[in-house]
Image (cartoon, rainbow, N blue to C red):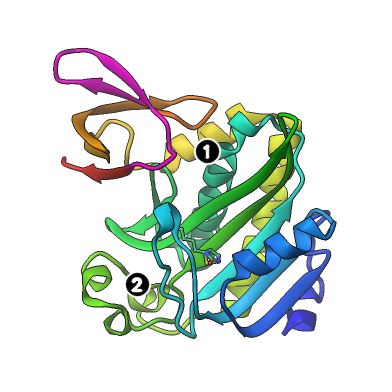
Amino acid sequence: MVRRIETGLKTEIIGKKIVHHNEAKSSQEIAKGLARGGAEEGTIVIVETQTGGKGRRDRRWFSPKGGLYISIIFRPEESPSRSSIFSFLGGVGVAESIQELYGIEAELKWPNDIQIGSKKVGGVLIENLTEKDRLKWMIMGIGLNVNIDISSLPEEFGYTATSLKRETGDRVSKLKLTRKLVEKLDQLYFILKGEGVDEILSKWRQMTNTIGSQVQIKNGDVIEGRALDVDKDGSLLVELGNGELRRINAGDVSLRKIS
Ligand code: BTN
């Protein structure tokens, strides 16, 4: 499997080292262990099925066989407050890969969801370690429902989830998709390092379905308003009904589009 991904892979950083497991608790945990042990930037961990897949906000990420579960180690120069940009970078990488391989328009829902027709097909989880106000390492975890029967997901997820198999009407090559995604992420990381955050944000803005929508946000309180934009730290700027502007940090919030 590793050799099949590596063969002819056109990347500078990402995927120079690939670790593969048929089953593990979570690719994220393996990648963190490797990062702590000094693994080089660009190391990726791919797991075929996870028994303890992690989603955002301490949720479980159901990880049956047929999905893509990948974690990538970054050692960026960015300040820790910029780590959300990696969530956008991951989302753009997935959406562009889906568009180029299957001609399907995937949309990005703030902060980290990848959707097709308002149903979630994947998500990005960013975890990092900071030391003396610098990022020591960051792990980008991506979970994608590839060749999954949605009926195999628990009911509450099934209603709001989709898979590439369902959207394309057939099984797709996970190998091709993995290679495309790794190459995309590599290119986008170069764009981030060269042209900076604005270029990634502008790509994200073109693919998001959040900006311009009426949204409800829960993080203890519940607020409603119109999503106006995101800033360089990945926060969402929301205009409340009374005209007040609120900056919402991606941290621990859930967002629902109302219209
Ligand atoms: C989300 O909540 O939407 C983010 C889901 C991220 C899941 C991926 S699968 C690969 C990596 N390993 C994990 O345990 N989680 C991430």
Farthest-out residue, top: 243
Residue 230: quadrant of the picture: top left
Q: Dot 2 surroundings within 10 Å: few (below 14), some, or many (20 or more)?
A: some
Q: Is residue 136 above or below residue 82?
A: below
Residue 177: quadrant of the picture: bottom right
Q: Which residue in the protein does label 1 denote?
A: 203
Q: Is residue 200 magenta?
A: no
State whether label 2 is within 8 Å of ligand 1.
Answer: no
Image coordinates of residue 173 in percent, x first then y, are 56, 81
Q: Which residue in the protein does label 2 denote?
A: 167
- In front: 5, or 84? 84
Q: Is residue 162 above or below residue 65?
A: above
Residue segment shown in magenta: 237-253
Q: Residue at x 50, y 66 (%)?
A: 143
Kind of residue at disc 2: Glu
Q: Residue at x 44, y 54 (%)?
A: 56
Q: Is residue 174 left or right of residue 238?
A: right
